Image (cartoon, grey):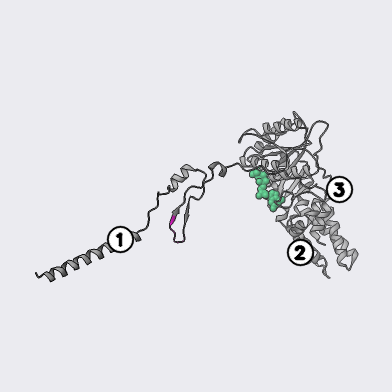
């Protein structure tokens, strides 16, 4: 090989080596930098901070990026809820007037239908049948319906032609007579001397018994009374918790026992607490399961007997769900045979057009409706006022 050829080969080799070096240098600088330390896996993060939530977060592409555990200490995340502040409910006077719009919303169709039928020029048999049907559909019961129709027929004949206000007046008079404004609807909740009044709340589960007990406590506290609650519905643990929440909110002591414990013993302790606290009223929420009539009789009988060792049972309130119609009435009858009911709390009247149940339940049980539930809100329980009720049915 000539010297010049050797020189060319050497130059070419040096150039090749230089290009290769540049290539490797470039590749190394474009390689991603690995993370300094791998973050803990989800399970590890959870072990370190059991209460930490959402340790992983999905990006838009569906891939999961593991996040480091949150910086704050775990116990803050499981801290107990703060006690609800005690609020002061409004007094009970005029409550039903305040809730009248709600009553009108559910019951107005009945009034409108009846007023329209009675305002027709000709009131033939078909129209009277329709009036009868309307009253029966509203759960008024057969006898009250027949009485109302009989009275209206006579009065309409006497009147001859009818102005709208005359028709309204006639109907108002008849409905009010059936609701019976003369019944004594006093709630016996005032203490006697040193002893608190005791209210026993009975009824089938789901009728709104616990809710009514809590709402009633609010009504009484709004009226300036001191109230103790007894969670004698030991059958369902959640019922005691529910009552506790009501008690915490309005500032009423709640006496409760173990789940499945003896309801009579809770009732006894509640009355003892009422005496000790110089309370005006002790309200005892019972389970009142309708398993068998004798079982029910034993349970409620024992609760009553045990209370009477320390005080008197002044009011036995039967809670009845207005939406359950005839089924509810049958259950009510069983309770009436087992305990001496002194008043009815008719709940969920906001959820049914069948307000006639006020009339039929009073007739069948011979006990006045003393309270009505008109919603799920804390202040949606009102002392029953017959005139406000009838006016809400008829509309303004
Ligand atoms: N719309 C409406 N709902 C009501 C009324 N009263 C109670 N409720 C609802 O009825 C449901 C049942 O109420 P509870 O008080 O738990 O019934 P309960 O009879 O005590 O049932 P247990 O606790 O199982 O014994 C709850 O969702 C209440 O909010 C009312 O007047 N109107």
Which residue is rendered at x = 15% and y = 68% of the image? 7
Q: Relative to residue 3, is residue 386 drawn left or right?
A: right
Q: Which badge, 1 or 3, is on the more N-terminal residue?
A: 1
Residue at 44% x, 44% y is 44
Q: Position of residue 17 (x, y in %)?
A: 22, 63
Q: Which residues are magenta?
A: 59-64
**Alpha-carbon span between mark 1 and mark 2:** 99 Å
Q: Decide if residue 208 is in sight here.
A: yes
Q: For the residues labelled 1 and 2, say whether their Cβ atoms are less than 8 Å apart.
A: no
Q: Residue furthest left?
A: 1
Q: Main secondary structure of the magenta part?
A: loop
In this picture, is 108 found above or below 48?
A: below
The residue shown at (71%, 47%) is 320
Indicate yes or no: mark 3 CB to ligand 1 under 8 Å.
no
User: Percent position (x, y) of residue 29?
Assistant: 34, 60
Identify the disc placed on residue 182: 3
Distance of label 1 from label 3 (alpha carbons): 104 Å
Q: Are marks 1 and 3 in contact (CB under 8 Å)?
A: no
Quadrant of the snapshot with the N terminus? bottom left
Identify whether 43 is placed above or below 269.
below
Q: Residues within 10 Å of mark 3 (few under 14, many from 20)?
A: few
Q: Residue furthest front?
A: 3
| Classed neighbour count for the residue bearing mark 1: other residues with Cα under 10 Å, few (<14), some (14–19), many (≥20) | few
In the image, is residue 134 part of the stretch drawn in magenta?
A: no
The residue that disc 1 covers is 25
Labels 1 and 2: the sequence-earlier one: 1
Q: Which residue is mark 2?
A: 130
Where residue 355 appears, as percent x and y from the top left, is 75, 55
Residue 150's place in the image compared with 246, above or below, is: below
């Amino acid at each position: 090989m000539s010297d010049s050829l050797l020189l060319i080969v050497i130059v070419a080799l040096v150039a090749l080596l230089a290009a290769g070096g540049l290539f490797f240098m470039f590749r190394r600088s474009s390689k991603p930098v690995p993370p300094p330390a791998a973050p803990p896996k989800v399970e590890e993060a959870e072990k370190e901070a059991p209460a930490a939530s959402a340790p992983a977060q999905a990006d838009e592409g569906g891939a999961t990026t593991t996040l480091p555990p949150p910086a704050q200490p775990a116990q803050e995340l499981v801290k107990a809820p703060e006690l609800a502040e005690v609020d002061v409910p409004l007094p009970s006077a005029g409550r039903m007037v305040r809730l009248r719009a709600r009553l009108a919303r559910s019951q107005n169709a009945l009034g409108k239908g009846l007023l329209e039928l009675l305002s027709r020029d000709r009131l033939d048999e078909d129209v009277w049948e329709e009036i009868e049907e309307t009253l029966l559909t509203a759960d008024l019961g057969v006898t009250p319906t027949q009485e109302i129709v009989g009275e209206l027929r006579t009065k309409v004949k006497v009147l001859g032609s009818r102005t709208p206000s005359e028709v309204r007046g006639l109907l108002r008079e008849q409905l009010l007579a059936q609701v019976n404004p003369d019944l004594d609807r006093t709630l016996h909740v005032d203490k006697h001397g040193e002893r608190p009044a005791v209210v026993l709340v009975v009824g089938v589960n789901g009728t709104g018994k616990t809710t009514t007990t809590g709402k009633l406590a609010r009504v009484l506290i709004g009226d300036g009374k001191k109230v103790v609650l007894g969670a004698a519905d030991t059958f369902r643990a959640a019922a005691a918790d529910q009552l506790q929440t009501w008690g915490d909110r309005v500032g009423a002591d709640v006496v409760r026992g173990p789940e499945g414990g003896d309801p009579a013993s809770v009732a006894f302790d509640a009355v003892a607490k009422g005496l000790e606290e110089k309370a005006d009223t002790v309200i005892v929420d019972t389970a009142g399961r309708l398993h068998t009539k004798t079982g029910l009789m034993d349970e409620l009988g024992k609760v009553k007997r045990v209370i009477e060792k320390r005080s008197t049972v002044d009011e036995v309130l039967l809670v009845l769900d207005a939406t359950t119609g005839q089924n509810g009435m049958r259950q009510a009858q069983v309770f009436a045979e087992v305990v001496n009911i002194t008043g009815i709390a008719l709940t969920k009247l906001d959820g049914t057009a069948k307000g006639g149940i006020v009339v039929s339940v009073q007739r069948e049980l011979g006990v006045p409706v003393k309270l009505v539930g008109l919603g799920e809100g804390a202040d949606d329980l009102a002392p029953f006022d017959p005139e406000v009720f009838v006016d809400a049915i008829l509309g303004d």
